[in-house]
Amino acid sequence: MQKYIILFSIFFIISCNSQGKRPIPGETEYQKEENIRFKDASISPLKKKDLKKFKGLDFFPVDTTFIVTAKLTRTENAPIFEMATTTDRKPLYKEFGKLNFTLKGKNLELTIYQSQDDTRDEKYKNYLFLPFTDNTSGDESYGGGRYMDVMTTDISKKNTVVLNFNNTYNPYCAYNDKYSCPLTPRKNHLDIEIKAGIKVFKKH
């Protein structure tokens, strides 16, 4: 889960550009913030050789049809379980609920999870974890799937939440194999092409 709070303001971005520096790439503020973070050597997951050649992350064109409202059905008394990762690490998660939504005329469902480590951290206790794969995975997008952060504070009283697939991101393992990343559960495969959000990273 992304746990870096971007401290750069729009004013900072504008002031940098006004001083003749290269404009921050990205169609949206989300994309610009991601590119700023990845360019920062102190927090970037990129390997040194990739960081030197980094000019910006590759995203699908922003498409508002990939912004949907999902109905949340909370999972009662869900057991805590060890989620498989790319390493031997087994972080503890709990199923938070099911998200049902319609996209491109298809009725789809994803399971959303809550990290048990996050529930003990005041900064991240409202974060929910939504991993998924789709029919672009392994081709135009990262084969291990993509992630989306959802906030419990964004869930309405009617148990609906807006999912913006334009704001998806890759696990750090897509950039550097030193990281340990949760594996997307098989039940979270969407039988549709999600041509929105982050694309696969082409390593140098």
Image (spheres, helix red, strand yellow):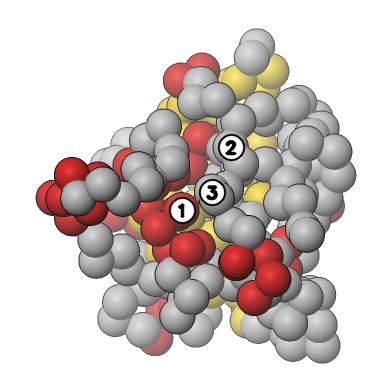
* Secondary structure at numbered mark 2: loop
| Relative depth, front residue between 57 and 50 | 50
Real-space Cα separation, disc 1 to disc 3, in angstroms: 6 Å
The answer to the question of whether label 2 and label 3 lie on touching residues, with beta carbons closer than 8 A, is no
Q: Residue at x 55, y 50 (%)?
A: 55
Q: Which residue is at the far top?
A: 105
Q: Residue at the spot x=77%, y=58% of the render?
A: 203
Res 5 visible: yes
Q: Would you name the residue on which mark 1 appears?
A: 35
Amino acid beneath label 1: Asn
In the drawing, does residue 126 fall left or right of residue 95?
Answer: left
Q: Earlier in the sequence, mark 1 or mark 2?
A: 1
What is the spatial separation of the Cα atoms under label 2 and label 3, in whole angstroms? Answer: 9 Å
Give yes or no for contact between labels 1 and 3 (Cβ–Cβ under 8 Å). yes
Q: Is residue 171 left or right of residue 115?
A: right
Instruction: Indicate the secondary structure of the residue bearing disc 1.
Output: helix
Using the rendered image of the protein, determine whether residue 155 is visible from the camera's viewpoint.
Answer: no
The percent position of residue 149, horizontal first and vertical second, equals 47, 55
From what the image shows, is residue 171 above or below residue 45?
A: above
- Asked whether the residues under the numbered discs 1 and 2 touch, taking CB atoms below 8 Å apart as contact, a structural biologist would say no
Question: Label 2 belongs to which residue?
Answer: 59
Residue 68 coordinates in the image, percent (x, y):
47, 26
Give x and y (percent) for residue 183: 76, 65
Q: How many marks?
A: 3
For this rendering, which residue is in front, 153 or 143?
143
Which mark is on residue 56?
Answer: 3
Q: Position of residue 90 (x, y in %)?
A: 73, 85
Which quadrant holds residue 121?
bottom left
